[in-house]
Amino acid sequence: LGAFSDTLGWPRVPQIFQQRMVFAASATQPSTIWLSKTADFYSFSPTEIPDQDRADSITDGLATEIITTASALNFTLDSDTLDEIQWLAESKKLSLGTSASVYMLYGSETNLTVTPFRFTINKESTFSASNVAPVVVSNAVIYPQIGGKDVQALLFEGQDQQWFSSKISLKGY
């Protein structure tokens, strides 16, 4: 069985990021994100079987599965609030707008490429996100909050290497 079905639900938030198909927020897993294998949008298997001609591919009659830097990965946001993923926005880092805050997914500070061995997820803002897709302009992610009364901007400051959040509207309708 897989993570997606008529019974378990289908993801409702798609995005392409670093040559991976990214899905998020199924009906039964609203805080989970799935990233495909690199350059293979249809493979979400976290392991693969090496070539059968290799000596290390079979051990005691069983196929050996390995994880590579291109393997698929998935995870569920872990926080003190219910963070239902509302949208994904692609830039150098993948922004995840949730019902409680905004997170950024990336490899590391020195290498932004996401792999199963190297990924970081940070909460960058405690302002909620609505289900309206954000707009990415240069080094800013602009999005409406839940309820549509405020528009927030997450702005990346290069010299501080940090994201700053600010309200940029009096009222957004």
Image (tube, rainbow, N blue to C red):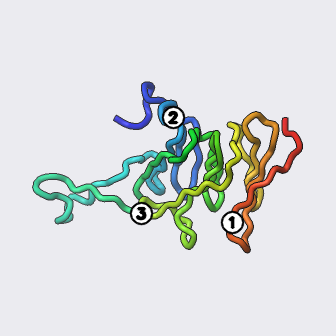
Amino acid at pointer 1:
Gln
163, 61: nearer the viewer: 163
Write the residue at 61% across / 59% down: 93
Quarter of the image where the N terminus is located:
top left
Q: Which residue occupies the extreme left position in the image?
A: 60
Front-lying residue, 17 or 115: 115
Circle 1 sits on which residue? 162
Q: Quadrant of residue 171?
A: top right
Residue type at the position of mark 3: Phe
Mark 3 → mark 2, Cα distance in angstroms: 25 Å
Say which amino acid is labelled 2: Ser
Circle 1 SS class: strand
Helix, strand or loop for disc 3 = loop
In the rendered structure, find residue 117 and report the number of the disc placed on it.
3
Q: Residue at x 65, y 58 (%)?
A: 91
Q: Which callout, 1 or 2, points to the residue nearer the camera?
A: 1
Residue 109 in picture, x, y percent from top left:
57, 70
For label 2, the SS is: loop
Mark with earlier residue (3, 1): 3
The Cα atoms of the two marked residues, 3 and 1, are separated by 23 Å
Residue drawn 43% across and 52% down?
73
Q: Which residue corresponds to mark 2?
A: 26
